[in-house]
Image: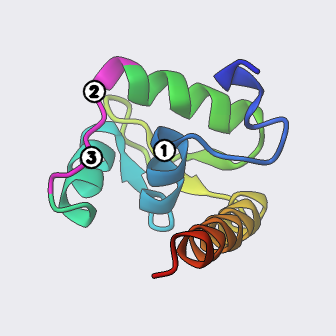
């Protein structure tokens, strides 16, 4: 199944997950990229093209919204309630995946 179908299935790619997580607080594009690097201790990074593609998809799905902060040069985004709910479901889904893997691997 193509990765593009993941949002329709209620699942997030890693890029969408970290982008949405970074938008619990309002941020503009460059700050989103820096926040993702900081929150993952530089273990995950998102380039501008990938980030803006993901932002478009998250906007279209109603998971984030564009804020009018009066700054024309920078677009600022924040997660919507729908986005936060999907993020919570995704955390639970990943937790269940890890629990199953630990059980199978006997860790």
Assign a secondary structure to mark 3: loop
Q: What distance separates the C-alpha of mark 1 from that of mark 3?
A: 9 Å
Q: CB under 8 Å between callouts 3 and 2?
A: no
Which corner quadrant holds the C terminus?
Answer: bottom left
Q: Which residues are magenta?
A: 42-49
| CB atoms of marks 1 and 3 within 8 Å | yes
From the top left corner, tell me how far across and down residue 84 is, in percent: 67, 66
Residue at numbered disc 3: 44
**Residue, disc 2:** 47
Question: Quick check: 82 above or below 56?
Answer: below
Proximity of marks 2 and 1: CB atoms separated by less than 8 Å: no
Q: Earlier in the sequence, mark 2 or mark 1?
A: 1
Q: Which residue is mark 1?
A: 14
Going 42% across and 59% down the picture, which residue do you hit? 22
Closer to us: 61 or 15: 15
Q: Please identify the quadrant where the N terminus is shown.
A: top right
Query: What is the number of the mark on residue 36?
Result: none
Q: Secondary structure beneath disc 2? A: loop
- Residue 54 lies left or right of residue 46; in this view the side is right
Q: Earlier in the sequence, mark 1 or mark 3?
A: 1
| Count of picture labels | 3
Tell whether position 63 is magenta. Answer: no
| Residue mark closest to the camera, 3 vs 2 | 3
| Left or right placement of residue 64 versus residue 33 in this view | right
Label 2, label 1: how many angstroms apart (C-alpha)?
Answer: 13 Å
Q: Principal SS element in the magenta part?
A: loop
């Amino acid at each position: 199944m193509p990765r593009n179908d993941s949002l329709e299935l209620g699942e997030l790619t890693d890029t969408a997950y970290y982008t949405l997580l970074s938008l619990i607080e309002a941020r503009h594009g460059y700050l989103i990229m820096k926040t993702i690097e900081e929150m993952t201790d530089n273990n995950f990074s998102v380039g501008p093209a990938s980030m803006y593609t993901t932002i478009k998809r998250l906007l279209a799905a109603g998971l984030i919204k564009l804020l009018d902060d009066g700054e024309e040069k920078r677009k600022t985004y924040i997660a919507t309630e729908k986005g936060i709910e999907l993020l919570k479901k995704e955390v639970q889904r990943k937790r269940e995946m890890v629990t199953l893997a630990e059980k199978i691997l006997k860790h």
